[in-house]
């Protein structure tokens, strides 16, 4: 066992002061971090427990929601305003993990969780640039079923594992962070980095910065939304492909649309190109197919995950057809 020290933060300021140095990690529910410690992937010298910080969900003045970082995933999924105004978010959370894990996991921890790439988690036998920068990537040419097909690089093709974050990306969520230099707000779609040549840098958080809350803006289209996850088994499995979508239709045309994909990229993948093609166009299956085909036109799969392109197309088409039909 690698020895470490443990402390509990009584406030955000306490947490910021405690994590400004290398080797220090925040502990929320521990559902990912503790697993990585057991495997030897993470070896923190200090754990700062933030699970006792504020865990409220409240309405903003503009009709959105502000969700404290320590809110448990299960509480967020069950909240009445989430279920009625943002059903895709509730369904995404319920599609992830088990009830026991959702009861422990926090919103900020979900956002900060690390990849489940088998090579990243194999300390003893695999090279991984995310775990050991510059060591190489054994996933290139290896077992690729769960690897990325868009946004990857030669250095890393691991996927982001979160279901919740896919829905948050589609909902234009904002990440509120605080640090020694002050507070700032980061769009969730910009919060996670693509790997490039530094896959060990996974987010844009600076040293000593922590997530304090997630804001979801008011959205008329989000009330008619859903989340669909395709996986190898019915439960307790990460996505091969997932789709978070919302559509409003007027006179047979797409009035507004939100679309994000999971399981295919190193970060939650907001389908901006597909959305732009769909807005103002016909709400038909052929139009949906053309839009998602354009979104995935630059996909670079390996032999073991080329099926994800067609799977993503078919899943997105089915979800959009269902939502458009509900709007008729």
Image (cartoon, helix red, strand yellow):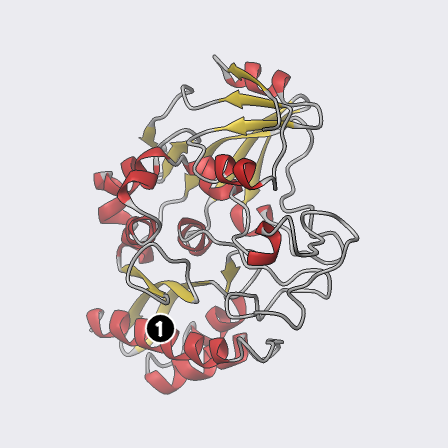
Q: Nearer the viewer, residue 322 or 142?
A: 142
Residue drawn at 52 percent across, 47 percent down: 188
Residue 175 position within the rendered picture, expressed as x and y whole percent measured from the top left? 51, 39
Residue drawn at 62 percent across, 70 percent down: 142
- Relative placement, left or right, of 317 versus 42 is left
Q: Secondary structure at mark 1?
A: strand
Q: Please, is residue 223 above or below residue 33 in the view?
A: below
Furthest toward the right, the residue is 134
Quadrant containing the N terminus in the rendered view: top right
Quadrant containing the C terminus in the rendered view: bottom left
- Relative placement, left or right, of 275 versus 102 is right
- Relative placement, left or right, of 105 versus 326 is right
Q: Please, is residue 149 above or below residue 175 in the view?
A: below
Residue 154 position within the rendered picture, expressed as x and y whole percent measured from the top left? 73, 66
Pointer 1: what residue?
254
Furthest toward the bottom, the residue is 286
Residue neighbourhood size for the residue with mark 1, other residues' Cα within 10 Å, grouped as few (<14), some (14–19), many (≥20): many
Residue drawn at 50 percent across, 81 percent down: 293
Could you say which quadrant of the image residue 31 lies in? top left
Residue 246 position within the rendered picture, expressed as x and y whole percent measured from the top left? 34, 62
Q: Nearer the viewer, residue 198 or 120?
A: 120
Q: Nearer the viewer, residue 36 or 238?
A: 36
């Amino acid at each position: 066992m690698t020895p470490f020290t443990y402390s509990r933060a009584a406030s955000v300021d306490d947490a910021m002061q405690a994590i400004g140095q290398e080797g220090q990690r925040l502990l929320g529910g521990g559902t990912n971090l503790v697993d990585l410690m057991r495997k030897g992937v993470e070896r923190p010298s200090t754990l700062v427990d933030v699970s006792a910080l504020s865990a409220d969900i409240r309405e903003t003045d503009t009709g959105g929601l502000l969700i404290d970082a320590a809110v448990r995933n299960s509480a967020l999924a069950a909240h009445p305003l989430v279920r009625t105004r943002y059903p895709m978010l509730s369904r995404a959370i319920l599609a992830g993990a088990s009830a026991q894990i959702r009861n422990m996991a926090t919103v900020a921890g979900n956002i900060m969780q690390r990849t489940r790439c088998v090579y990243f988690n194999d300390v003893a036998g695999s090279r991984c640039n995310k775990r050991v920068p510059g060591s190489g990537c054994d996933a290139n040419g290896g077992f690729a079923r769960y690897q990325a097909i868009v946004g990857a690089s030669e250095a890393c093709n691991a996927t982001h594992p979160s279901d919740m974050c896919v829905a948050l990306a589609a909902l234009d969520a904002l990440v509120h962070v605080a640090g020694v230099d002050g507070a700032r707000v980061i769009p969730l779609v910009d919060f996670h980095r693509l790997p490039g040549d530094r896959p060990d840098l996974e987010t844009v958080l600076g040293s000593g910065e922590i997530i304090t809350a997630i804001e979801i803006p008011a959205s008329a289209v989000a009330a008619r939304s859903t989340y669909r996850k395709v996986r190898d088994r019915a439960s307790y499995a990460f996505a091969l492909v997932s789709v978070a979508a919302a559509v409003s239709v007027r006179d047979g045309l797409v009035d507004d649309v939100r679309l994000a994909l999971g399981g295919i990229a190193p970060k939650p993948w907001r389908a901006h190109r597909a959305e732009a093609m769909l807005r103002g166009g016909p709400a038909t299956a052929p139009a949906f197919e053309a839009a998602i085909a354009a979104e995935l036109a630059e996909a670079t799969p390996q032999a073991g995950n080329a099926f994800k392109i067609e799977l993503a197309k078919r899943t997105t088409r089915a979800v959009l057809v269902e939502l458009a039909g509900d709007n008729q």
